[in-house]
Amino acid sequence: MTSELGKAVSLAEVRALVKHLDEKLARMAPGAMINGLTQVVPADGASDQRLEQLAEFAAGIVSAQDLEKVIDRTLLMALKMAGADRAFLHVRESDKSVLEKMRTAKPDSNAWAAEKIARACVDRVRDAEEAVQMANVRADAQLGDDAEAYDVDLGPLVCLPMREGDKLLGALYLDRRTGAEPFGAGELKIVRAIASIASRAVVNAQVIAEQTARRQHLEMLNKLYSAISRTLELDQLLDQITQITLEVTKAERAFILLMNGGQLRFGGGRDQGGPLPPQASRELSRSVCQKVLKTQEGVYVFDTSSDAEFSAKLSVVNLKLNSVVAVPLKGQQGLSGLIYIDSKTQSLTALEKELAILTNIANVASLAVDNARLYRQATQDGLTGLYVRSFFMVRMEEEAMRAGRFGRIFSLLVMDIDHFKRFNDSYGHQTGDEVIKLVAQVIKRAIRGGVDIPGRYGGEELVCMLPETNLEGAVVVAERIRTQVETGGLTGPNGEPLRVTISIGVATFPAMGETGTQLFERADQALYMSKQNGRNKTTVYQVSG
């Protein structure tokens, strides 16, 4: 072995390097490393060259922070140093999650069959927690029959457990072709060293992966906190929660269902392509949702094919779901809804390690939903969903101050339903409410969501503020609303068509009013002119002089 300066390195220096690498591993994963690597490096019977190879292997694997890279490098080293024809590594990440890989020294069209033998050996190691070694696989009743049936060119094999303390991490399997020499004592010592070094590297990679995941989870939670702190609008909030849930879980769909009148109602939904319409919530596993409602606990079905309770559920079968998870939202008044995710094309087994982040998202979402609902109750009219008068007037004064400071414009529409008293007198107050709701829905569809601010000023009088909109643009919006109301197609209690029209007054800041209150007075005067001139009209305030 040669140093960076080109000077030969002694065997003692190689041992010192290995010890240094073990100490480095211990620093990178505190508490995870036991017994120095020097204890698994052969003290005798191994050449300087093999010690150098082990030192190089240890040095390389220390820097491999990805578990798949650890597995790949271990297989390559085992093939190289043990003179094996095939190498197979099995690492268990959790009770249901494993990583496996096979490598061959030469191209092998029957490697898939050898892999079945390797898995059978791994099962024996896992059950007995002891090494399996055979001079000839044909001498084993079960494996010999399997090798014969699969027509595998396979002779001697060895399968060693990979441990970290008392914990079994996995197994390293090696074999040679028929007629080859069994693995000798020196080779087995080297393989044990490789397995021991790899075990420490596996733990190291797992610790780093956990730390990385924890950091990513904290970043996601910070992103969620940041998102919900910027808005109290319930619809925007629900969309942000579903978006972040998809990012964290890598699921195909995410929904938030909210309790309303004792029933779960669509709050928001997304798939990897973007927002989903309310009707998409019809294709959910109702049995999963109902279990959450009943138990008020999360339901985690990461692989429906292996879950006896849910694999036969009609909703799971009909929707062809591979994974489905539902987490309750527990608010101040009890269960307020749930977060639901599912996937059809892949199993979400990796989510088993993500339960903490799902719970944290649900906790944050519960608090945010409660706050947004309280905000909605305080600021929005219960019948129409438009902003209440007090909130609207405050926002309009704020907009007037902002526009005045920065030299911007905005416009105001004041609207009144024509002959509204007739609807109440002729058809009753319920029909009158339906008329108001119709007009409110038209207004919300005709304006810019999240920009324009609609409100219910009182009774049948409605308003809408249009930021950054000049007089011409405001008239376009006003006429759009007026014509859509007129053609709304509302019917009375007996199915008779109702002719609903509105009159509108328009005023623009600052040309027609220098404060919010003044602008409202001018738009209201324009509305009065629309009424005077026959109703069902849009009128712009006329500046005198």
Image (cartoon, rainbow, N blue to C red):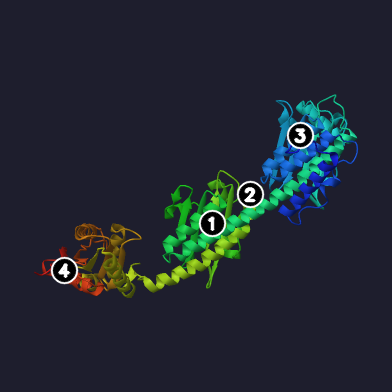
238 vs 216, nearest the viewer? 216
Residue 284 in view, yes or no: no
Q: Earlier in the sequence, mark 3 or mark 1?
A: 3
Crowd tier of the residue under label 3, counting other residues whose Cα lies within 10 Å: few below 14, some 14–19, many 20 or above = many
Residue 441 place in picture, x, y as percent:
31, 61
Label 2 SS: helix
Q: Earlier in the sequence, mark 1 or mark 2?
A: 1
| Residue receiving disc 4 | 526
- Structural distance between the alpha carbons of marks 4 and 2: 64 Å
Q: Earlier in the sequence, mark 4 or mark 1?
A: 1
Label 3 SS: strand
* Eye-nearest disc, 3 or 2: 3
145 vs 387, nearest the viewer? 387
Q: Earlier in the sequence, mark 4 or mark 3?
A: 3
| Residue receiving disc 3 | 87
Residue 283 place in picture, x, y as percent:
49, 51
The type of residue carrying mark 3 is: Ala
Horizontal side of 399 relative to 262 (left or right) equals left
| Residue receiving disc 1 | 340
| Residue receiving disc 2 | 349
Horizontal side of 106 relative to 533 (left or right) equals right
- Structural distance between the alpha carbons of marks 3 and 1: 42 Å
- Structural distance between the alpha carbons of marks 3 and 2: 26 Å
Give the residue at the far top of this rendering. 179
- Structural distance between the alpha carbons of marks 4 and 1: 50 Å
Quarter the N terminus occupies: top right
* Eye-nearest disc, 4 or 3: 3
